[in-house]
Each structure stands twice: as C-alpha cells, then as structure tokens.
C-alpha cells in the first residue's frame, strides 16, 4: 500500500514570495490534515479536511495561508506572501475516516524562507 | 487549548542503557498516542492508549497511561542505535483532534 506522498521535499524562497505544497493521501482515506512543524516543536494542526470539506481550520493563518481539496483526494497548501517565521516542515497526514483514528504521515516538505 | 509538556527535551545515552521519557498535561485526555519521527521523515505511530492506568508493550518499549489520563511515560529497555529519533506524544479530548507535545530527542550511541 502506497503511503502519503508529498512534493516538493525541499523549497527555498525569499520572503514575500508565494509557495505551494502538494499532498496525495493514502487511497480511500477520507480525512486529510496539514501540519506545520517548526524546528524544536511538535506538529501543529493547520487544517483538517473530511472528503472535500473543511472540518477545522482554526489555527490556519488565513491572511496568508490557503488550502484546498477540490475532489476529496489530493490537496494543496499555499502560502502567499511568505514570512521568515513560515520556515518549517509542512506535514500532510491522512486517516481512514475521522479524527482519533490512526494518522499516517507523509515525509513532509521542508520550507526555508530567506 | 490542551498543552503537553515532554521531558527531557534531549537525551543521549549509550547502547544497552534503559531510559524513560515523560509526557505531562493539566488536561484529561480520552486517548494519547506516542510517535517516533526520524530525520527527514514524518512521525510514525507507535501506540495508542485509551484507559487510565493502561500499560502496553511493544518489544522493548513499554508505554503507560496515567490513572488520571493526564500523563504518560515511555520506557525503553536496552536501547539500540535504531531507537534514535524524536519521540512525540499527542493527546486528544473527547471528539477532538490530537495535539502534539514538543518531543524528546533521543540519541543512542553505539
């Protein structure tokens, strides 16, 4: 069974530029999560999708971050414009149906904002 | 907002030693998970505990959930270099998403 796929693995941009990350969850998983993991910290939930609907985006900085999962399968997370403090690993995870089920994480995208 | 603390923040030990890491909160959790994250990879689930006082064993790893469901510990017996990584705990209230602690970074030297 293929795992959660993410791309790119690494990205370096300058502040005020925009960037997008892509995630393809495990086939059949209805729930998809985006997390931000800053160096030295645990992952922080940014947004949770159930199929193509948003369940929780309370910690998403909506002035600069956006995410979509149009067909209920893969998802993109965008930052526009990026700030220095956005430097982090962005992790995507999926679970079969709902929260509190086992989450399977992708390898993450490491973002450096200069 | 539920906050989790993990201790120690860093731990460096020799192969064959035993160790315990801790996860604490002032909040009560309906379930608590432990993950291991290796450099350049996403976290991988090790165990989920749901009952106060519950003890689960996974080979050389022993996980305990506190009686009050506010804390947990992970004990590793005879640590090996392959145990090196970031150990994260995550707790969830009833019907809520998991919140992660900051992790304990373990280094096991051969």
Image (cartoon, coloured by chain):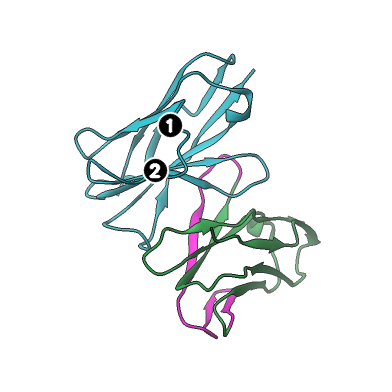
Chain colours: A cyan, B green
Which of the image's four quarters has the C terminus of chain A? Answer: top right
Quarter location, residue A65 = top left
Cα gap from disc 1 to disc 2, whole angstroms: 9 Å
User: In this orientation, which residue lies closer to the viewer: A10 or A63?
Assistant: A63
Magenta range: B39-66
Residue B63 appears in the rendering:
yes
Q: Nearer the viewer, residue B76 or B24?
A: B24
Residue tagged 2: A57
Q: Are marks 1 and 2 in contact (CB under 8 Å)?
A: yes
Query: Which chain letter goes with mark 2?
Result: A
Q: Is residue B47 above or below residue B83?
A: below
Counting the numbered discs, the total is 2
Vertical position of residue A95 compared to residue A71: above or below: below
How packed mark 2 is, by other alpha carbons closer than 10 Å (few <14, some 14-19, many 20 or more), is some
Quarter residue A98 falls in: bottom left
Looking at the image, residue B61 sits to the left or right of residue A57; the answer is: right
Residue A62: assigned label: 1
Label 1 secondary element? loop
Q: Residue at x 61, y 43 (%)?
A: B39
Residue depicted at x 50% and y 18% = A81
Magenta stretch: residue B50 in it?
A: yes
Indicate which disc, 1 or 2, sits on the residue closer to the N terminus.
2
Q: Is residue B61 visible?
A: no
Q: Position of residue A113 (x, y in %)?
A: 60, 21
Report x, y in % for residue A93: 40, 46
Q: Is residue B8 magenta?
A: no
């Amino acid at each position: 069974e293929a795992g959660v796929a993410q791309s790119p693995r690494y990205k370096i941009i300058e502040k005020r530029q925009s960037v997008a990350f892509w995630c393809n969850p495990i086939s059949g998983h209805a729930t998809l999560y985006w997390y931000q993991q800053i160096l030295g910290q645990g992952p922080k939930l940014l947004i949770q999708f159930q199929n193509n609907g948003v369940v929780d985006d309370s910690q998403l900085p909506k002035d600069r971050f956006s995410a979509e999962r149009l067909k209920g399968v893969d998802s993109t997370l965008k930052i526009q414009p990026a700030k220095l403090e956005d430097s982090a690993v962005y992790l995507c995870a999926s679970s079969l149906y709902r929260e509190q089920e086992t989450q399977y994480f992708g390898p993450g995208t490491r973002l450096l904002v200069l | 907002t539920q906050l989790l603390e993990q201790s120690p923040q860093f731990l460096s030990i020799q192969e064959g030693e035993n160790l315990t890491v801790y996860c604490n909160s002032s909040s009560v959790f309906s379930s608590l998970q432990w993950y291991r994250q290796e450099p350049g990879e996403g976290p991988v689930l090790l165990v989920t505990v749901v009952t106060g006082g519950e003890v689960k064993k996974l080979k050389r790893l022993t996980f305990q959930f506190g009686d009050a469901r506010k804390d947990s510990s992970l004990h590793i017996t005879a640590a090996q270099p392959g145990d090196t990584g970031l150990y994260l705990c995550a707790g969830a209230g009833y019907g809520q998403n998991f919140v992660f602690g900051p992790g304990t970074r373990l280094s096991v030297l051969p």
